[in-house]
Amino acid sequence: MEQSLNIIKIVESWDMSLCNRSRHYAKIDAAEIVEGAQFEVFDAPLCIVSVDDTKVELSYHNATMVLNRDWQVLGTPAYGVPNEHLSITERYILFFESNEVTKEGATDAFVEAFNRMFANANEGNFWKNIALGRECLRLMKHCISFNDAEFLPELRLLVCQRVIDEDMIEITEAPRLYQSFCEYYRHMLEFVDFDACDKEIGQDLQRCFFTQVDEYRDKLCWIVEETPSDHAKELWQGLGGMLKRDTVQMSRKYEESIYEVECELDDMFKDELRGMGFCHAYWSAKRAALASRGIEWRSVATMNPRVMFD
């Protein structure tokens, strides 16, 4: 599969009450991405630290980033640009994408995966949507052509909108996946003409939904950094509402492990009645499963000792 690493630079400038927004595109062929390679991207060095079949570790703008090659759409925080006359910020979006035509059966596979996500969310099995959400993004980025007449940007936009708006993924369990849907939504928004898009899809699209997406995006771009700051940890606690969540759930290691852990727990408790007190047995088993993978996790009950859970 021919892939490229896409880097999008987004510049916003404010002059009094007016805001101008511009996008600039760069691509690096995946075949050129090898350990130690260096590239000049938007007048800044981008260095490849390590590469394997699933992810790339890179250094760009004095930050280390790890990008999954299949599903992830990574957005950075906004950086201030010195200017004595205007207020200017710039941020970057990075993701791999295939340049091939639609693969046979890819659209049907996507529809099946998305329908299963919808069913899982209705049943409360949100953990199952971690793998399905990754698969949906992989299919959209690598297997379904951007110019596919049956899967144009407005349909991709609607898919991301529904995943976010209907909470099909738990943001505190998979922040990078959640961010990817937000960033892909924002990317697709640039290509949609609301007045010209399909009438049926247009009726479902919310023109101002991007304001909600931007709120999540602006928090998550800090939270998913490889070395989160105190500011990121404060933002993280705000995502859980009134309840505190262990900051270890911010880590890439936790997110890469949690689906496998949930599969293990689902099998462990498949014959158990899930009534009063079950949550404590579940949290204890989850803590042990994560500990076996080198992750020290504290449950929401441990993080909120004054709250009673049953």
Image (cartoon, rainbow, N blue to C red):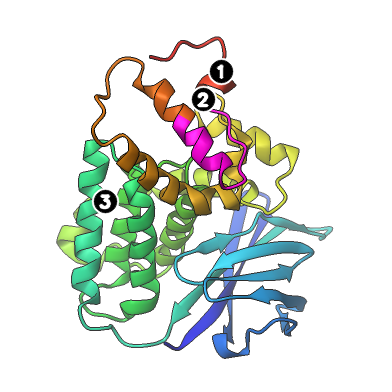
SS for dot 3 = helix
Q: Gap in Å between the C-alphas at discs 3 and 1?
A: 30 Å
Relative height, residue 150 to residue 183 (above, below): below
3 and 54: which is toward the camera: 54
Relative height, residue 240 to residue 278 (above, below): below
- Which callout, 3 or 2, points to the residue nearer the camera? 2
Binning the other alpha carbons within 10 Å of mark 3 as few (below 14), some (14 to 19) or many (20 upward) gives: many
Q: Which residues are magenta?
A: 285-300
Callout 3 amino acid: Met
Q: Gap in Å between the C-alphas at discs 1 and 2?
A: 6 Å
Callout 2 amino acid: Val
What residue is pinned by disc 1?
304
Q: Which picture quadrant has residue 89? A: bottom right
Binning the other alpha carbons within 10 Å of mark 2 as few (below 14), some (14 to 19) or many (20 upward) gives: some
Residue 305 location (% of width, % of height): 57, 13
What residue is pinned by disc 3?
117
Residue 137 location (% of width, % of height): 38, 65
Q: Residue 251: which numbered mark, if any? A: none
Q: Relative to 161, is 19 on the left or the right?
A: right
Callout 1 amino acid: Asn
Q: Relative to 196, is 167 on the left or the right?
A: right
Name which of mark 3 and mark 1 comes first in the sequence: 3
What residue is pinned by disc 2?
300
Question: Residue at 38% of width from left, 14% of height from top?
Answer: 310
Q: Quadrant of the N terminus?
A: bottom left
The residue furthest left is 200
Residue 209 location (% of width, % of height): 38, 47
Question: Residue at 38% of width from left, 77% of height from top?
Answer: 142
Binning the other alpha carbons within 10 Å of mark 1 as few (below 14), some (14 to 19) or many (20 upward) gives: some
